[in-house]
Image (tube, helix red, strand yellow):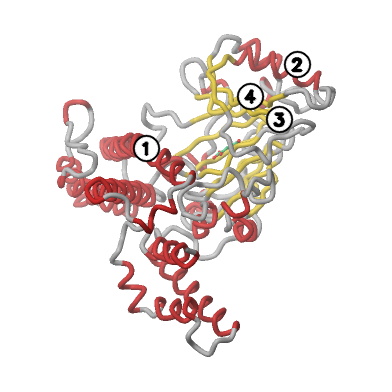
């Protein structure tokens, strides 16, 4: 039983979760399978050292192959800490060459001091001004996440595996709860049921005009996503103890996050080590980076890679007035160490567009593999060796896949739209940006042309561009560069 499990894991690791069987041939020819054979069968001089060395060779070869296959913007080494730069004097070109292009995080200071909200939303003693926000946005609707607090606990950092409940609320209701929460802080009788609320993803729009709150820092203005109607621009407001679960940002976008008040702790995990964050089937993402240490309940066996992930994770303490650039594809989890108010954006441009398309393509491949497998099971029944894998984590994976089908189609349309919009703008694109667009577009047109990407076809009239038209625009513009 155990060896079947090991083989399944190896098969999954070597074939991109079973979606690319042909990768096994690479592993055979470059010697990784031989190295594994020595390890698994223990047939070579049977010393622990030899087995360990073989396993290390195999692991290094797998890692090298994975890195080579990964997107070219993934850094080959990750920093042990995040550098701080003076945001007022740091040149944009240096931000691009040192951080955005190599896809590495950085903290920038001084970018929020001139924002209107630095005065109107923050009290003189540097706290989020709840009284003002509650009055000014009394009836404005915003999503609020509710998480139950374990008895006697002051934070939900080691939150239970269940997702926090997101409910539509008003800023007024949230501010009222906050006042009550502050006056009751530390006074609730032990054992009394309590909860923490976190107002997150409150979008800028007509009921929250961006210009009255902040201005987008110059480092992040090359933004193809928020140029559109799509708004990925948010406010986060939460008391000390609230947190955001482990995730990577939508569509492998970049994000930036500025603290107007408070302090956050971030753990950032480089994309080279994403696999360590998943359960033993490579399916379900851990809820947070310490899920194996807290809550008991067998989480250690569920997420065996987390101890190693913590060794490569970069811990960042972000103070009021500081802005964190979160690179593309870096998973992160965020804890509010004080009552915290922040503004953030997700965004795409020529530096992460290729990665974004890569992520979408991976999801499409995984979904295609899943539907092929389901078809096969329908025709032939469940293979006996698979029966033991059917446990809760497979069910969770299935639910996640269903959700992915729904979001992937939306993401594809959005990306398609972003490119169409970008090309439609009468603006000069740099040759490297044009290369990216041409690559991504070429793959899109191919997929759409084959008609096998969720049947998303040319739409023309509805505002989307036809694939061939887009290619034509790229070709024409290319001749002009
Ligand atoms: O501040 C938070 O709680 C989450 C922010 C985040 O995940 C992001 O900016 O990408």
Residue occupying the point 49% across, 52% down: 100
What residue would you read off at disc 3? 149
Relative horizontal placement of residue 449, taking residue 382 as reference (left or right): left
User: In which image quadrant can residue 460 be found?
Assistant: top left
In the figure, 443 relative to 215: above or below? below
Badge 1 element:
helix
User: In which image quadrant can residue 122 be found?
Assistant: top right
What residue would you read off at disc 2? 180
The mark lying in front, picked from 4 and 1, is 1
Which mark is first along the chain, 3 or 4? 4
Q: Does the residue labelled 2 lie within 8 Å of ligand 1?
A: no
Numbered badge on residue 26: none
How far apart are the alpha carbons under marks 2 and 3?
16 Å
Relative horizontal placement of residue 218, taking residue 21 as reference (left or right): right
* Neighbour tally class for label 3: few under 14, some 14-19, many 20 plus, Cα within 10 Å: many
* Residue in front for this viewpoint, 425 or 42: 42
* Residue in front for this viewpoint, 244 or 481: 244
Numbered badge on residue 117: 4
The mark lying in front, picked from 2 and 3, is 3
Which mark is first along the chain, 2 or 4? 4
The mark lying in front, picked from 4 and 3, is 3
* Neighbour tally class for label 4: few under 14, some 14-19, many 20 plus, Cα within 10 Å: some
Numbered badge on residue 402: 1
Badge 4 element:
helix
Which mark is first along the chain, 1 or 3? 3
């Amino acid at each position: 039983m155990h060896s079947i499990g090991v083989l399944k894991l190896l098969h999954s690791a070597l074939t991109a979760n079973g979606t690319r069987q042909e990768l096994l041939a690479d592993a055979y020819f470059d010697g990784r399978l031989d190295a594994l054979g020595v390890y698994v069968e223990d047939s070579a001089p049977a010393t622990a050292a030899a087995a360990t060395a073989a396993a290390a060779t195999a692991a290094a070869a797998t890692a090298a192959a994975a890195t080579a296959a990964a997107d070219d913007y993934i850094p080959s080494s990750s920093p042990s800490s995040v550098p701080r730069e003076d945001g007022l004097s740091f040149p944009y070109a240096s931000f691009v060459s040192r951080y955005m292009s190599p896809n590495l995080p950085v903290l920038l200071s001084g970018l929020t001091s001139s924002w209107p909200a630095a005065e109107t939303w923050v009290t003189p003693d540097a706290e989020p001004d709840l009284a003002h926000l509650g009055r000014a946005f009394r009836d404005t609707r915003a999503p609020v996440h509710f998480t139950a607090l374990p008895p006697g606990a002051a934070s939900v950092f080691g939150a239970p595996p269940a997702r926090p409940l997101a409910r539509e609320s008003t800023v007024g209701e949230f501010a009222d709860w906050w006042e009550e929460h502050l006056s009751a802080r530390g006074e609730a009788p032990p054992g009394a049921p309590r909860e923490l609320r976190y107002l997150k993803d409150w979008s800028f729009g007509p009921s929250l005009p961006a210009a009255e709150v902040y201005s987008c820092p110059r480092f992040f203005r090359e933004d193809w996503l928020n140029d559109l109607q799509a708004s990925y621009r948010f406010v986060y407001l939460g008391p000390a103890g609230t947190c955001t679960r482990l995730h990577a940002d939508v569509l492998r976008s970049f994000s930036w996050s500025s603290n107007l008040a408070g302090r956050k702790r971030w753990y950032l995990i480089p994309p080279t080590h994403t696999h360590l964050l998943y359960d033993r089937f490579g399916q379900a993402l851990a809820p947070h980076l310490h899920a194996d240490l807290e809550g008991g309940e067998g989480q250690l066996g569920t997420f065996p890679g987390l101890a190693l992930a913590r060794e490569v994770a970069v811990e960042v303490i972000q103070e009021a007035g500081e802005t964190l650039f979160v690179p593309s594809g870096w998973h992160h989890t965020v804890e509010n160490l004080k009552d915290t108010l922040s503004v953030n954006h997700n965004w795409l441009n020529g530096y992460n567009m290729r990665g974004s398309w890569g992520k979408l393509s991976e999801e499409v491949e995984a979904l295609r593999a899943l539907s092929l497998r389901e078809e096969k099971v329908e025709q032939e029944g469940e293979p006996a060796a698979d029966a033991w894998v059917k446990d809760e984590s497979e069910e969770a994976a299935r639910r996640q896949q269903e959700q992915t089908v729904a979001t992937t189609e939306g993401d594809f349309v959005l990306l398609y739209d972003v490119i169409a919009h970008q090309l439609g703008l009468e603006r000069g694109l740099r040759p490297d940006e044009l290369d990216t667009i041409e690559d991504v577009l070429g793959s899109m047109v191919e997929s759409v042309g084959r008609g096998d990407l969720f049947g998303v076809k040319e739409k023309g009239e509805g505002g989307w561009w036809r694939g061939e038209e887009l290619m034509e625009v790229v070709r024409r513009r290319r001749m002009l560069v």
